[in-house]
């Protein structure tokens, strides 16, 4: 996974006066699984449509496998696509749906049958050739759509929210299957999603978008542990935010508290937010130690493998969320109404300038 397969250069997209994509540049390596992640309206589908040639950009270039395809007609492009809404032909059998692209490529009937058989085995639907879309569940229809997208062995697989119409159990299952299939085939893949869990579990690289710009590009681990902006920190995973002021090179002030920080701070920075993930807050039996504050558990919520408590720390206005395991909860006596001492470890803090 090294050479660039798809490159986007300074893409802009305007719809009337609305600037939907602003100077978007991105390299996708051969065989990479990239997720465009962001809230509704951030421009992820617009970007995918430009890559597929379904829309032309207002400005910028798209390069695939060394060729400028910015203005290439869809039929001359090398990609397969799966939409959220399956988009199968209802009047065609599963076999004819999957073979559709092969017919247009003049592949012989016996070769088409063999390829469809192979693809149905790949997506776990062997023997479904003669069924019609209406006879299949949503998950099965999406597998057929995936088989159809892969039929011509495209260099690029585009997935536009392929799992969002499915129920949670099918979605989790198919998520794993698509990831395994993509790794096995090694096909360069771009998936649009607004679901951070989907992006974190499936992507090699996440492109976090907001208001038509890329906020951060990085591996799931990097985006989660080193978010570049308050927006990324709040959109990917849970994050607590505290309004703060810079009080020294490595010291912040929030409410009545001084908070020590690992990195160097700039005294000129204003509108600062200190942030910490719920799983990074530590509980202690007394107030000893840096960044440790007294408070109370406001309430707890059972999340299965862990417990989420809402904390009210003395001298800090905003409630904080903290996650602990069931074992820790019992040992540390974390219960609604109980007093606690909580540490915001300085090496787990993030500092951002500007709002979320
Ligand atoms: P969603 O998850 O809701 O699909 P998205 O991140 O995919 O959101 P886009 O569909 O790319 O967002 O839309 C980006 C912005 O551009 C939105 O404000 C949308 O209303 C606008 N937009 C998209 N397509 C058009 C169009 N054909 N004409 C006018 N505005 C459009």
Image (cartoon, rainbow, N blue to C red):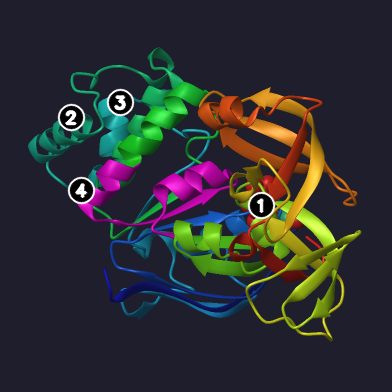
CB contact under 8 Å: marks 2 and 3:
no
Question: On the image, which quarter does residue 146 sit in?
Answer: top left
Q: Name the residue under label 1.
A: 235
Question: On the image, which quarter does residue 45 sit in?
Answer: bottom right
CB contact under 8 Å: marks 1 and 2:
no
- Pick the residue in front: 99 or 235: 235
Identify whether 208 is placed above or below 9: above
Mark closer to the chain start, 2 or 3:
3
Asked if residue 141 is among those painted magenta in the image, a careful observer would answer: no
The x, y position of residue 186, in whole percent, is 23, 56
Q: What element carries label 4?
A: helix
Q: Mark 4 points at which residue?
A: 184
Is residue 169 at least partly visible in the picture? yes
Q: State ligand 1's quadrant.
A: bottom right
Q: How far apart are marks 2 and 4 (CA)?
A: 14 Å
Mark closer to the chain start, 1 or 2:
2
Which residue sits at x=60%, y=28%?
329
What residue span does the magenta drawing correspond to?
179-205
- Pick the residue in front: 89 or 172: 172
> Disc 2 vs disc 3: which is toward the camera?
2
- In the rendered structure, find residue 109 and report the number of the disc placed on it: none
CB contact under 8 Å: marks 1 and 3:
no
Mark closer to the chain start, 1 or 3:
3
> Disc 1 vs disc 3: which is toward the camera?
1
CB contact under 8 Å: marks 3 and 4:
no
Q: How far apart are marks 2 and 3 (CA)?
A: 13 Å
> Disc 2 vs disc 4: which is toward the camera?
4
Q: In which quarter of the image is the N terminus?
A: bottom left
Local crowd at mark 3 within 10 Å, few (<14), some, or many (≥20)? many
Mark closer to the chain start, 4 or 1:
4
Mark closer to the chain start, 2 or 4:
2
């Amino acid at each position: 996974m090294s050479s660039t397969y798809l490159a986007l250069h300074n893409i802009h997209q305007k719809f009337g006066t609305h600037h939907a994509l602003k100077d978007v540049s991105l390299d996708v390596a051969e065989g990479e699984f990239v997720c465009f992640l962001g809230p509704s309206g951030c421009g992820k589908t617009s970007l995918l449509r430009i890559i597929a040639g379904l829309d032309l950009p207002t400005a910028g270039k798209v390069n695939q496998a060394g060729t400028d395809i910015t203005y290439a007609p869809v039929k001359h492009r090398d990609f397969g696509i799966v939409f959220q809404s399956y988009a199968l032909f209802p009047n065609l059998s599963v076999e004819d749906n999957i073979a559709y692209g092969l017919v247009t490529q003049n592949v012989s009937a016996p070769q088409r049958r063999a390829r469809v058989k192979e693809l149905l085995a790949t997506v776990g639907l062997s023997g479904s050739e003669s069924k019609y879309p209406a006879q299949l569940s949503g998950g099965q229809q999406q597998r057929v759509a995936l088989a159809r997208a892969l039929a011509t062995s495209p260099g690029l697989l585009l997935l536009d929210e392929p799992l969002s119409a499915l129920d949670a159990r099918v979605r989790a299952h198919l998520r794993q299957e698509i990831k395994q299939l993509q790794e096995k085939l090694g096909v360069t893949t771009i998936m649009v999603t607004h679901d951070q869990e989907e992006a974190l579990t499936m992507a090699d690289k996440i492109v976090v978008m907001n208001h038509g710009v890329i906020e951060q590009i990085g591996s799931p681990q990097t985006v989660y542990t080193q978010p570049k902006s308050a927006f990324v920190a709040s959109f990917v995973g849970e994050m607590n935010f505290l309004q703060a002021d810079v009080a020294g090179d490595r010291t912040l002030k929030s409410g009545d508290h001084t908070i020590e920080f690992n990195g160097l701070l700039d005294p000129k920075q204003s509108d600062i937010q200190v942030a910490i993930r719920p799983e990074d807050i530590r509980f202690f039996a007394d107030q000893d130690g840096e960044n440790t504050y007294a408070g109370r558990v406001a309430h707890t919520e059972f999340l299965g493998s862990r417990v989420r408590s809402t904390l009210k720390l003395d001298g800090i206005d905003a409630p904080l969320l903290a996650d602990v395991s069931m074992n820790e909860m019992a040992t540390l006596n974390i219960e609604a109404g109980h007093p606690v001492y909580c540490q915001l470890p300085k090496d787990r803090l993030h500092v951002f300038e500007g709002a979320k």
